[in-house]
Amino acid sequence: MRGKVEITLNSPKTFYEIYVNCYCELRSRYTHEKFESYKIVLRSDESPLPAGKHSFSFEFEVNTYPISWQGENLSTNWYVMAYADIPLGRDKKVIRGITIDYAPSEKSIPFNPVFVADNLLGGVRQYDIFHKKSNQLFRRILPEEVKVYQGEGNHESFKPHIRLTLFSIFLSLLAIPSLWAHSTLGWICIALWLFFVPKTYFYYRKELERTRCGPLSVIVEKQDFKRGQTINIQYNLSPKKAVNIKKFTVQLEIMEVFYKRYNDYDDRNKMKIVTHTIPIQEIMSREDFILKPGEYHEQTLAIPLPPDLMHKVHTECHQILPQIGLHLETKHGNTISASLPLNITP
């Protein structure tokens, strides 16, 4: 990257330092992280700079990640800042946004860059944006541990809603006699009964439909993929009973993750994980069919990764995770999903 800093002075001026700083910001609606990557001092001589127009050229090689990303709830933005440190005066600075994209293949950027960033407690911490340790959202399994990487969904058994069921039964015992003994309390019970009993019915209809669909899974045999590479995935549907399916989709997605700070009732500072999924590319789609048990519902797909696919990023407060998503939409509005994060490296 090449550029220049121009300063116009009406009178001689003394500067402690004039420098250029390049940094990256990861920002969501609730969180913000800043990574300082480059600093080039253009002038550190404290002798007065004469009046007139002065130009200072700078040049540095961009050899780090993440690339620029504009998601729906999360973004990574790069900036160049020119800063003039003025003694006993108000410092001046100018900030310009820049876009950093993937390097050409013949000039690949080194893998595993380390950033220095301010953490949530106000200190400074170094960490790798391609973090390999365990966390609450994504476990990058090392190759020597297992040979198969699998994402699963809908493995929960039937879950009755105890409180809703008991409350509906209680309202039924009150509302049915009230049909003959008219009173204000009786009409209130009937109104509540007309609301909660259908609510209970629709809950159990969707829950029964979900359990009939059975588990979903998606598998890859390795990780650490490159953009533009073709990968092979295998998905498996295991229905327990016949279910009417409105739409089945296999797609490439980006999951944005950030941490929202909030105070609970005891005014204790806590953090909540917020996730948002962005569809990138639909790989396969099938509509209006009956999913039956005993049929062959396993298939292997070859998926070419887009050349501009965002790589995986993992910092203290933010994550950007490319993933393969399976989505099964049933006739009665259930959406059953399974996803497998992909470790996309630059």
Image: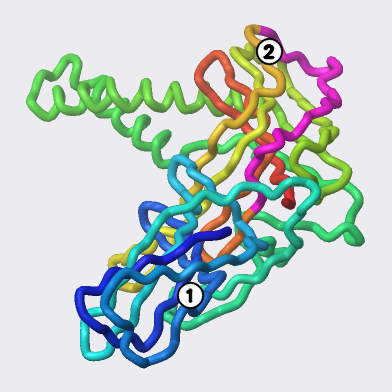
Foreground residue, 218 or 3?
Answer: 3
Marking on residue 250: none
Residue in view at x 28 percent, y 69 percent:
8
* Above or below 249: residue 86: below
Q: Is residue 308 left or right of residue 318?
A: right
Residue in view at x 42 percent, y 34 percent:
165
Comes first in the chain, label 2 or label 1: 1
Amino acid on which disc 1 is placed: Asn
The residue wearing badge 2 is 286
How far apart are labels 2 and 1 at the CA level? 45 Å
* Above or below 95: residue 85: below
Residue 15 visible to the viewer? yes
Q: Is residue 332 left or right of residue 7?
A: right
User: Residue 243 sits in which quadrant?
Assistant: top right
Amino acid on which disc 2 is placed: Arg
Please name which of the two marks, 2 or 1, marks the residue nearer to the observer: 1
Task: Please give the range of residues in magenta.
Answer: 289-312
Foreground residue, 234 or 214?
Answer: 234
Residue in view at x 59 percent, y 13 percent:
246
- Under circle 2, the secondary element is strand
Residue 73 x/y as whole percent = 43, 45
Residue in view at x 50 percent, y 53 percent:
76
Q: Is residue 79 left or right of residue 303?
A: left
Instruction: Quarter of the image for the N terminus: give it.
Output: bottom right
Foreground residue, 100 or 267?
Answer: 100
Residue 155 visible to the viewer? no
Residue 257 x/y as whole percent = 52, 51
Q: Do the residues under discs 2 and 1 have CB atoms within 8 angstroms?
A: no
- The chosen color scheme is rainbow
Marking on residue 119: 1
Residue 168 x/y as whole percent = 35, 30
* Above or below 162: residue 65: below
